[in-house]
Image (cartoon, grey):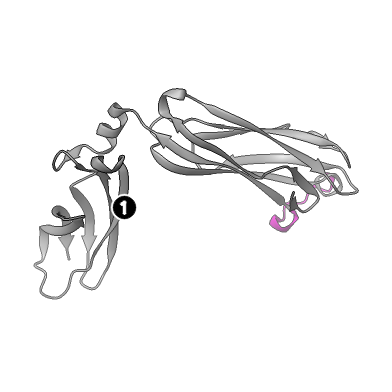
Amino acid sequence: MFVADSLIVIGLATVSLGTIHEADGVQERDFWLRNAGTEAVVLTQGYTSCGCTTVAFPKDSLIQPGDTAAITLRFNPRGKGGDFEETATLIYSLQSEKQKNYSLQSKRKTVHLSLTGSCITSEETLLRQFPIRINDTLRLSADRFDLGIMHVGETKERTVVILHRGQADRREPILITFTPDASTPKGLQHIPHPVKAGNEEITVTLDVIIK
């Protein structure tokens, strides 16, 4: 059991969906909370880490000491390739605190529930997510990045994701860091930046205005 103040998650607070396919559609799992305290509690709010996940719960209903409440998490895998971990946060308070209409953040209590797994996307989704073809085995999420306006000494980061088609569609995120120095020409620049992908060296373009 995972203890979260006076609410206890019966069973696991994190449930693995295993390997699923995008075509399988929405996946859902039920979680059960039990009030292990001595006073009734009220679930007042719930939010999730991503719009692909929703949480359903008995909002504003009292959970008396010893009683349980069902919480349902639904995960929509559309466009979600690779490993995932989506979390729902439920906010609750003791009945007496809610009746006093406390607005202080310290009076709010939370419990966290999660769905994890790995999603296999459709070919159409993969091509949309990785539109830049390098060769038969490599594709990129993007090959140019807009860094906006930068000043000498300023640093910005972007991430390019490489899709390895010959390795079960493995995704490899690579961090790109750029810092203009005094020798960098002023004005609009289109700067080539090398990226190493296995034995391949790929060049992406950084569009930036140097002030």
* Identity of the residue furthest to the front in this view: 167
Q: Residue at x 19, y 58 (%)?
A: 196
User: From what the image shows, is residue 16 above or below residue 38?
Assistant: above
Q: Residue at x 36, y 31 (%)?
A: 121
Horizontal relation, residue 91 to residue 137: left or right: right
Image quarter in which the C terminus is found: bottom left
Q: Of 189 and 14, which appears nearest the observer?
A: 14
* Identity of the residue furthest to the right in this view: 38
Amino acid of disc 1: Pro
- Corner quadrant of residue 130: top left
Which span of residues is magenta-colored? 99-107
User: From what the image shows, is residue 201 above or below residue 155?
Assistant: above
Residue 56: in magenta span:
no
Q: Residue at x 24, y 41 (%)?
A: 166
Horizontal relation, residue 111 to residue 67: left or right: left
Q: What element does badge 1 sit on?
A: strand
Q: Of 208 and 34, which appears nearest the observer?
A: 34
Horizontal relation, residue 204 to residue 15: left or right: left
**Residue 125 locus on image (x, y percent):** 31, 30
| Mark 1 Cα-neighbour bin, 10 Å: few <14, some 14–19, many ≥20 | some
User: How many badges with numbers are in the image?
Assistant: 1
Residue designated by label 1: 173
* Identity of the residue furthest to the bottom in this view: 182
**Residue 207 locus on image (x, y percent):** 16, 54
**Residue 70 locus on image (x, y percent):** 73, 32
Q: Residue at x 81, y 36 (%)?
A: 68
- Corner quadrant of residue 190: bottom left
Q: Of 49 and 14, which appears nearest the observer?
A: 14
- Corner quadrant of residue 10: top right
**Residue 123 locus on image (x, y percent):** 29, 28
